[in-house]
Image (tube, coloured by chain):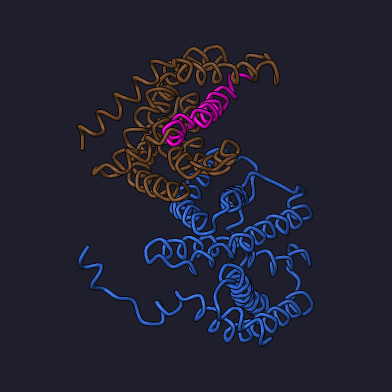
Chain colours: A brown, B blue
Amino acid sequence: MLGFMYSVIRRDLLLVMRHPAEMVNPLVFFVLVIALFPMGVSPEASLLSQTAAGVVWVAALLATLLSLDILFKADYADGSLEQLLLTSHPAWALVIAKVIVHWLVSGLPLVIMSPLVATMLFLPADAIPTLLLGLLIGTPTLSLFGAVGAALVTGVKSGGMLISLLVLPLYIPVLLFGTGAVAAAVLGMPVGGYMAYLGAMLVFALMVTPWAAATALKVGQMQG
Amino acid sequence: MSWFESWHMPRWFYQMGSPKWFFEIGGRLQPWFMVAAIAMITWGLLWGLLYAPADYQQGNSFRIMYVHVPAAILSQSIFVMMAVTGLIGLVWKMKVAFMVARSCTLIGASFTALALITGAVWGKPTWGTYWVWDARLTSTLIMLFLYTGVIALNQAIADRSIAGRATAILSIVGTINIPVIKYSVEWWNTLHQSSSFSLTAKPTMPAEMYIPLLLMVVGCYSLIVWLVLQRTRNEILDQERQASWVARYLEER
């Protein structure tokens, strides 16, 4: 089974490498959305530093959301998803492998980019490690819940708008704890509790979402 | 899964899985719930709105509670009911269960919206504002978003049985997330709270204020059973229109 997951990960990463736009576009979107806020709200450093964590997190949520298409859509369209589901390996293993690829392609680059954009938004330097760590623990949870949404809308024609309606409400706890941790760090308060909650949510998502996404993929195959 | 296969639910459970049975039993139960709902809601509303004593702080504006509290309770109950019936549908492959879940969606969303609207109307004279980002208000708003997601997914898939399964998965994931959302919102609120209001510290109510509320809550539960039965029976007639018993039923009417 690990061999199966490894080969799925290898194949999907190879596919992404052949189309680097899939990796670059969410990242550009992330920076672009963040750049809109100083222009739309105010370039004042005092105001921006207060909203920085929220802006970075909301942008990360949206960038993750818009990149969910790469999870199953292409494989569904060319029929390889059906073949992958027909193998003797459990469907949840496929889901986990796909989520790992999705996180490596869309989540990890955002995490690496976040100190830069946070500095541009005048987030105090002491709070940046907290933001980084929060995103590092939080973005895999976003990919996992996103996988459920992406699996549910495979085969639905207007899936793009629909998926955001399904997934965004489920992202709210991650957003609250992620931004809460940064707010606490700015005030010099301990952030361990927030990180523990983010970690607990990741474990919780790992328990629930692979099953849900796998079931949803099988249901989607009935549509044919 | 041998333990699972050797384990059986009571007989009526499987019988309710038959659309015909559900339609007939539902039709027999429906009038009882209708009478109970009309009687208790009329009694509760009259008592609550006209005869219950005015609140010593809020005056008469507290009376909106008799609609607001049942609506808020039901918004959560219906979501859980939707997830439970969806799970039954997935596990026992019963299409009637999906039909019940489908009937719940719009009713639940309506009650959630009602809870938000009545809360806003009450908030204006009491707090001086229609909306605050209080933990309870926020989690009710998220609840409404969860409902709209479920409804949107259900509408987007044309095939009813596939839509039922997909919706069931979403509502199960949503339901196990409700506690997470609730507690995260509460924690977020208490950290940010500066000038908010506590909804939890209610003055203890005398019986003449409390009993009408109880009547309203039980009456509204009967109301949704009645409505869900009605909608599910309509759904059965629609989806089973090829069946001979439906043709016979429609002819007899």
With A24 as the anchor, is A218 left or right in this view?
Answer: left
Majority SS type along the magenta span:
helix
- Magenta residues span A48-77
In this rendering, position of residue B17 left or right of residue B52? left
Q: How many marks?
A: 0
Residue A135 picture location, percent across and down: 43, 27
- In what quadrant of the picture does the N terminus of chain A appear? top left
The residue at 64%/79% (across/down) is B215
Residue B75 colored in magenta in the image: no
Q: Quadrant of residue B245?
A: bottom right
Q: Indicate whether residue A75 is drawn in magenta.
A: yes
Q: In the image, residue A140 lies at what x, y percent?
A: 39, 32
Q: Which residue is nearer to you in this view: A94 or A205?
A: A94
Closest to the observer, B160 or B170: B160
| Horizontal relation, residue A129 to residue A50: left or right | left
Q: Residue at x 55, y 29 (%)?
A: A62
- Taking A191 as reference, is A17 above or below it? above
Horizontally, residue B58 falls left or right of residue A122, namely right
Question: Considering only vertical position in the picture, is B212 above or below B186?
Answer: below
Question: In the picture shown, does residue A10 fall above or below B15?
Answer: above
- Percent coordinates x, y for residue A8 in the rendering: 30, 30
Foreground residue among B204 and B213: B213
Name the residue: 30% across, 44% down: A86
Residue B206 seen anywhere in this rendered image of the structure: no
